[in-house]
Amino acid sequence: MRQQPILTVNNLNISVSTPLAVAQPVREVSFTLQSGKVLGIVGESGSGKTLTCLSILSLLPENAKVELGNINFRNQNLLECSEEEIRQVRGKEIAIIMQNPMIAFNPVRTIESHFIETIRTHLPITKRQAKIMAVEYLEKMDLPNPRTVLKQYPFQLSGGMLQRVMIAITMSLNPSIIIADEPTTALDATNQLQVLQQLDKLKKEYNTGILLVSHDLRVVAQLADEVAVMYGGYIVEQAPVLELYNHPKHPYTRVLFESRFGLTRKKIQNDSPSSTSSINKENKCPYLDRCEDADHTCTNYNLEFVEFQKDHLVRCVKVLESIGD
Amino acid sequence: MSILVLKNIKKTYLLRNSVFEKRKSIEAVKNISLTLEHGVCLGIVGESGSGKSTLGKIILGLEKPDQGEVCFLGKNLHNLNSKELKELRQNLQVVFQDCYSAVNPRLTIGEIIAEPIRNYKRLSSVEEENQVQQLLKKVGLSPEDVHKYPSQFSGGQLQRINIARAIALKPKLIILDEAVSALDALVQIQILNLLAQLKEEFQLSYLFISHDIQAVNYIADCLVVMHQGEVVESLDDMEQLEQLEHPVSKKLLSSILPPFPKLF
């Protein structure tokens, strides 16, 4: 039994033109997000996670372009919206939390003016009312002395506090979707746990849909209901979180699992080169050069999803063979 | 003889919020004493703001301590004339967290790695190029990369270049200040493996500063936990990690996310 999804991304392809060549960092990406659910996207740097997120809000850099596909929010195709229409969606309906809170704030303005600007852009209320709202949401984020925090400048707060202020600003408009792009990467371990707890609280209290992007499987595991693993621009495996953890099928997903160290001191073997080329003209399997299981069948594989189980999709021809056996 | 001995190091910064306020003093490092033996990797963990990086800067001689002495290879680092200091400095190298700002974007990789060599040795250009190419091979990059610029590399590759520069003079001690924190999980392991291998090969000692107790546990031989400028707990054998007792250490351990999905 499935709810109507609030966000549907269908066959998204993004190209980036550079002086030397045209690269395709995002290919055939499709996913859906439901309210009150968390979709985790995991992948290494350069796998196309961030570009996918930016394209949802039409925030792509100038040299990047959506070639194909559509992004539907409720019944609106976000790619065909005018600049004015998308401004109404940004912040109010779909909000984004960036990786580095230090850069996302304006250093010469206080936290209070950030709050008031954001709230008053979307809601018809006075400055005084906006300030009361700000205090209320800062309290919800468990920040000590919200009134003092409002008077401070971004550089006077620590990274973890700033990231919680960011979540508070985001939440004050009660958006239906939050895109959290590596929300904890810049934070230390204790702050990371706090921020994750806050996001979990939001999801339960406000029924917000969260798109959680990270390179760290452990972060995603704590919150996500469903996980998509990205590699070389493709989603290579997609499954509910427990299914993925119990039966990782794509060789890359298995490498990701082996690279969690936890508290082991045993040396983990991992020599494969990490750079992936996003040019890939022949549309071959992006993982081919690194894959240990690869053989002649892989070169002719047309990269179609294999359904290993219901809701568990894998982009690997080897899985097809294992089902056949 | 120990390679590095810190005796009662203390460092205070003066800060003020506006021009009209009186300066407030913040004790970043309070009375720290440490000893590091040859060929050992000492891990320093702590939350942000616990004084780890200040301690690293004092050991490097980038900051002068208010009190106490830093003895590196038996000499007090903050009590030398410039000639002696230069002599000693080749044995002391550093790798920082932000690999992009640690390299000059207008120099090629070859020039970046050759810089410390040019400071200390007189080599012909052929010899120099040979050395640089060997260093690149050591850190797992291709020798043909010498003519590329930093912007053409990923974060993990740049961190390898920073490591190549750090080992160029065959130092005795390398300070790794959050050297892997900005990298993604797979690349972190590759860099940590590289560091462990170089440590064996060149008999290096490391001072590994990080907030990530898992990375420290993976590479370090012994550990100290810092909190608000003080060492609150130390451990000589990493196998006993679970036995850490101080509340700060417990908090660090409990903030490690479990590898499996939590069933909410």
Image (cartoon, helix red, strand yellow):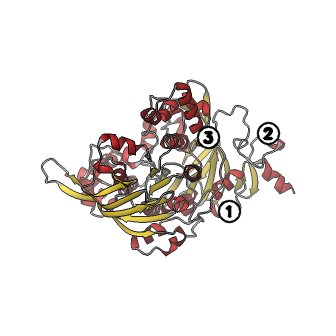
Q: Secondary structure at mark 2?
A: helix
Chain bearing tag 3 is A
Q: Which mark is residue A299?
A: 2
Q: Residue at x 64, y 41 (%)?
A: A232
Front label number (3 vs 2): 3
Q: Residues within 10 Å of mark 2 (few under 14, many from 20)?
A: some
Chain bearing tag 1 is A
The x and y percentages for residue A141 are 37, 62
Residue at mark 2 to residue at mark 1: CA–CA distance: 28 Å
Residue A68: which quarter of the image?
A: top right
Q: Residue at x 59, y 37 (%)?
A: B134
Could you confirm whether marks 2 and 1 are on the same chain? yes
In the image: residue A313, left or right of residue B159: right
Which one is nearer the viewer's eye here, A123 or B178?
B178
Which tag, 2 or 1, sits closer to the chain's start? Answer: 1
Q: Which residue is mark 3?
A: A275
- Give the amino acid at mark 1: Glu
Q: Residue at x 20, y 57 (%)?
A: B25
Which tag, 3 or 1, sits closer to the chain's start? Answer: 1
Tell me if residue B88 comes above or below residue A256 in the rendering.
Answer: above
- Give the amino acid at mark 3: Ser
Q: Which residue is mark 1?
A: A243
In the image: residue B20, left or right of residue A69: left
Please identify the quadrant where the N terminus of chain B is shown: bottom left
Q: Are marks 3 and 2 in contact (CB under 8 Å)?
A: no
The x and y percentages for residue B51 are 34, 58
Q: Residue at x 78, y 46 (%)?
A: A294
